[in-house]
Amino acid sequence: MNYSPAQGFNRQAFAFHPSPAMPIPAPAASPAPKIPAARPGNTLAELLIAVLLPSFVLMWLSGPEWLGDLGALLLALAFPLGWAIYSGLLERRFSGMAALGVISTLLTGGIALLALDTRWLAIKEAAVPGVIAIAVLLSLLSKRPLVRLMVFHPTIMNVPRIEAALLERGETAAFERRLRVGTLMLAGSFAFSSVMNYVLAVWIVHSPAGSEQFNAELGRMNLLSWPMIAIPSMLLTMGVLFYLARGIRQMTGLSLEECLNPQ
């Protein structure tokens, strides 16, 4: 120890000098905050609340000994309307499709409560998917077709990597053409739904709006719309997605895992 009464303590002698073999540990990094994953849609719950329960209420609870025509209709309309509001609050974002569902529900209730001609029900049933089909077609006039927002979106696909691969292989223009074909296919699926909705409404609903028979026919139409319209439309939409995904893999040479955006 370097100590002398004249000089006092040698502070350098007592200084701590870390050995190369004993590195000073770096301060622990604070863990990154976890971002809650988006809640996946519950198709079974949606089918139960938006289709099966309203149909059950309309078909079995419209009699005077139960809820009556008006009570059953209001309760049946409350299920899909409440589900749309609940889904919107849960996801904390505005959903155009949910808003369209709410408008459709309110129109159905208005037709029944005002006892309008059942032709208006058929027109309404055809108008909802028809408006979507027209919107999809009009998106072809813009630089970004609607199908691009649904499939080729940064939250789903690794857009920079895909665009770089397309540019490198000279497939950018071909990919844009495929997106436009996919947009036409998507519009076709909604057009199919529009026509089938009209046919189903004209075929099933004949009784005066607001009556017990009208409620029962409306419930039967809702039940049949699932196997006759919803499932075929879903399969057509899945075909569009497969068509686009297959085109991306072929044109970029990337695997599906490489195309998807890392979560």
Image (cartoon, rainbow, N blue to C red):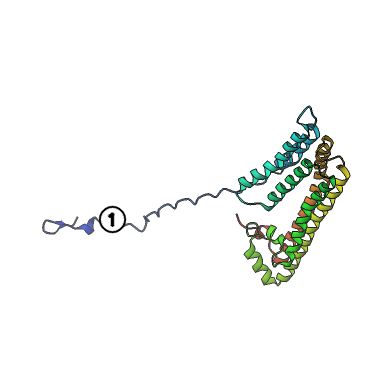
Q: Looking at the image, which residue is at 73% across and 41% down?
A: 50
Quadrant in which the N terminus appears: bottom left
Picture coordinates of residue 146 (x, y %)? 71, 61
What residue is shown with label 1?
16
Foreground residue, 81 or 247?
A: 81
Q: What element carries label 1?
A: loop
Q: Position of residue 188 (x, y in %)?
A: 81, 58
Q: Can residue 235 be seen in this view?
A: no
Res. 257 visible in picture: yes
**The disc labelled 1 sits on which kind of residue?**
Phe
Name the image quarter holding the C terminus: bottom right
Residue at the location (80% across, 38% down)?
210
Residue 29 image point, x, y percent:
44, 53
Residue plotted at (72% across, 36% down): 75
Res 59 quadrant in image? top right
Q: Nearer the viewer, residue 79 or 21?
A: 79
Determine the residue located farthest toward the left in the rendered image.
6
Whether 152 is drawn above or below 38: the answer is: below
Image-quadrant location for residue 181: bottom right
> Percent x, y for residue 253?
70, 65
Q: Taking 258 as reference, is 196 above or below it? A: above
The count of marks equals 1
- Quadrant for residue 236, please give it: bottom right
Left or right relative to 123: residue 82: left
Closest to the observer: 226 or 72? 72
| Residue at the extreme top of the image, as rendered | 65
